[in-house]
């Protein structure tokens, strides 16, 4: 009925309607984040749940992050070496690899990988709980579903994203070393000297801030989409869970890149 | 709400539904304290919706719900907190948390709301699981149990805080007759032992006849009947009689007007298998 009314609106009004809904949704997400964040510190019971989530989001992501970061570093090493060699600047390979990883690729690729691995399962888990009345069961037991389900995930994301990003950067630099130095014959000492000489604390703290923001964005969007699975207009039941999961991954990836641009302009 | 008196539930001019869509309107009813009230009605008539509104899972569209003398709409956060701790709920499919064992599911309200040491919590959980015949399944996950066992586990979880109000949403649906009768017996024993107000949603007539002290019948978007079981059995209302006697509505036009599907129209010819 409401959808039908929307379709009958003139194009400009529909655009305005969509914009208003977007703003409304963004506001609801922000309030959702604030409440979940506030409930992180409510009780000691949250600590055990957070540790379990750190294992799920952090520890279980290490293998995939290792693989992706190693190959990313190796590709950057390979491409950069040939590009720099053209100008006789192959000695700057360490600086190029480390700066591109720490400032940009590390935080972004880590966030996208965790979105795919852990974010999607956060949405699906909460979505299934929502459609099978488990969230209602928590409410009637007077257990706040946000505090019980979302806060531990949010706390774990805030802890895990920066650590996994640092891990990504480190393994990526080793990947660059593998191709640039061991495979193509660059100088090992020069590689590591350029890394330490050109990588400033501001680069590292910028990457750290980015990873923190991405952690909050990914976790909030994925949990929000799952939590409101039952409110979706495009589908119901199990299909709504799958649609919510897809929307969560796509929206997270888009917002990671969007916020990356904004943060890069502000931080560097 | 008095600490030990089973509370009444009073519904005044109540209209319930989702969004702007009303499902049942003009409900004026009292679900008496210390009794088993059965909410009866056909599928989709709003029985579960009514319970969800009493549990304040959805906002009412009009009217008010008074539980133990308190209007739940005007009750502040702390008041609602206290009220919910006196309520137990058995959802239609048990609604157990899939990632927790049966023991952890039942222990959840105790861990969240009490300062009991873990040893006492385990003792209480085992006692409630024993009450529903599931004490040996403490470490099982919900997906390892049958539908009936999940329902009984849901009942154990609903009972673990020793509530004064127990809501059961279709406790016997999908159960075999013996298990259903056992569950009815259990509800009667619980009422007798713990003096609680029970609200049971059902369309199982045998179950209703076994347990009901008070019946509320919903249909066609309104309350069709409320009163005692004997009063309901004596009713001459046409719809209620059909419902109670399990009689199908007589139709003037035949329902099966289409001829059976011709096997020749099937994409794959299975005729030779069917002939054999």
Image (spheres, coloured by chain):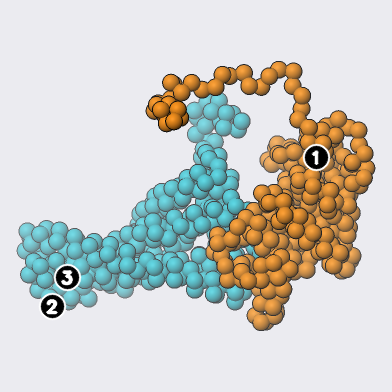
Q: Residue at x 84, y 67 (%)?
A: B194
Query: Which of these two is toward me, A84 or B187?
Result: B187
Please state which of residues A218 and A205 is positioned toward the viewer in this rendering.
Answer: A218
Would residue A151 appear left or right of A206 to someone viewing this image? right
Residue B218 numbered mark, or none? 1
Which chain did the renderer colour orange?
Answer: B
Question: Are labels 2 and 3 on one chain?
Answer: yes
Q: The numbered mark 1 sits on a residue in which chain?
A: B
Which is closer to the viewer, label 1 or label 3? Answer: 1
In the image, is residue B249 above or below residue A166?
Answer: above
The residue where tag 3 is placed is: A177
How far, Cα to Cα, is label 1 from label 2? 83 Å
State the image coordinates of residue B99 (x, y, percent, origin top left).
Answer: 54, 64
Same chain for mark 1 and mark 3? The answer is no
Q: Position of residue B250 (x, y in %)?
A: 77, 24
Colour of chain A in the rendered structure image = cyan
- Does the image show residue A35? no
The secondary element bearing badge 2 is classed as helix
Task: Mark 1 vs mark 2: give the one in front.
Answer: 1
Question: Do discs 1 and 2 share a chain?
Answer: no
User: Disc 2 and disc 3: Cα gap in Å?
Assistant: 11 Å
Is residue B222 positioned above or below A90 on the image?
A: above
Question: Which of the two discs, 2 and 3, labels the residue nearer the N terminus?
Answer: 3
Residue B69 x %, y %:
88, 58
Label 1: element kind? strand
Residue B173 seen in the current view: yes
Q: Residue at x 88, y 49 (%)?
A: B214
* Secondary structure of the residue carrying numbered label 3: helix
Neighbor class of circle 2 (other Cα within 10 Å; few <14, some 14-19, many 20+) is few
- The residue depicted at 45 percent of the width and 27 percent of the height is B275
**Residue beneath label 2, please?**
A189
The local crowd at label 3, few if under 14, some if 14 to 19, many if 20 or more residues have their Cα within 10 Å, is: many
């Amino acid at each position: 009925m409401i959808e039908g009314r929307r379709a009958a609106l003139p194009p400009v009004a529909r655009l305005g309607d969509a914009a208003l809904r977007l703003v409304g949704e963004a506001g609801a997400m922000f309030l959702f984040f604030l409440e979940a964040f506030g409930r992180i510190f409510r009780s000691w019971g949250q600590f055990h749940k957070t540790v379990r989530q750190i294992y799920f989001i952090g520890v279980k992501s290490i293998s995939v992050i290792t693989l992706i970061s190693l190959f990313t570093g190796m590709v950057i090493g390979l491409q950069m070496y040939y590009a720099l060699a053209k100008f006789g600047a192959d000695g700057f390979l360490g600086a190029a690899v480390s700066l591109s990883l720490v400032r940009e690729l590390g935080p972004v690729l880590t966030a996208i990988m965790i979105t795919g691995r852990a974010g999607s399962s956060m949405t699906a888990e909460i979505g299934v709980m929502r459609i099978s009345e488990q969230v209602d069961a928590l409410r009637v037991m007077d257990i706040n579903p946000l505090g019980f389900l979302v806060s531990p995930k949010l706390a774990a994301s805030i802890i895990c994203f920066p650590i996994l990003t640092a891990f990504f950067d480190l393994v990526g630099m080793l990947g660059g070393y593998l191709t640039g130095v061991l495979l193509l014959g660059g100088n090992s000492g020069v590689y590591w000297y350029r890394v330490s000489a050109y990588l400033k604390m501001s680069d590292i703290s910028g990457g750290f801030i980015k990873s923190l923001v991405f952690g909050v964005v990914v976790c909030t969007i994925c949990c929000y989409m799952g939590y409101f699975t039952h409110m979706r207009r495009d589908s119901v039941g199990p299909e709504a869970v799958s649609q919510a999961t897809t929307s969560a991954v796509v929206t997270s990836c888009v917002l990671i890149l969007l916020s990356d641009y904004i943060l890069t302009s502000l931080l560097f | 709400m008095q600490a030990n008196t089973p509370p009444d539930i009073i519904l005044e001019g109540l209209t319930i539904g989702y969004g702007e869509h009303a499902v049942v309107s003009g409900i004026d009813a009292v679900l008496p304290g210390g009794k088993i009230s059965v909410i009866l009605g056909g599928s989709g008539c709003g029985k579960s919706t009514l319970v969800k509104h009493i549990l304040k899972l959805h906002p009412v569209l009009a009217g008010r719900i008074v539980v133990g003398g308190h209007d739940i709409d005007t009750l502040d956060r702390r008041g609602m907190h206290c009220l919910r701790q006196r309520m137990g709920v058995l959802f239609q499919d048990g609604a157990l948390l899939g990632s927790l064992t049966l023991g952890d599911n039942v222990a959840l309200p105790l861990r969240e709301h009490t300062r009991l040491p873990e040893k006492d919590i385990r003792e209480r959980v085992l006692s409630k699981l024993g009450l529903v015949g599931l004490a040996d399944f403490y470490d099982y996950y919900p997906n390892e149990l049958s539908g009936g066992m999940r329902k009984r586990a849901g009942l154990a979880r609903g009972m673990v805080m020793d509530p004064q109000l127990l809501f059961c949403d279709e406790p016997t649906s999908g159960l075999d007759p013996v298990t259903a009768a056992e569950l009815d017996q259990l509800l009667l024993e619980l009422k007798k032992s713990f003096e609680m107000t029970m609200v049971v949603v059902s369309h199982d007539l045998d179950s209703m006849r076994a347990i009901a002290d008070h019946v509320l019948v919903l249909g066609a978007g309104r309350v069709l009947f409320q009163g005692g079981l004997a009063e309901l059995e004596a009713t001459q209302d046409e719809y209620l009689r059909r419902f109670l006697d399990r009689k199908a509505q007589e139709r003037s036009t035949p329902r099966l007007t289409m001829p059976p599907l011709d096997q020749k129209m099937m994409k794959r010819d299975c005729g030779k298998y069917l002939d054999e």
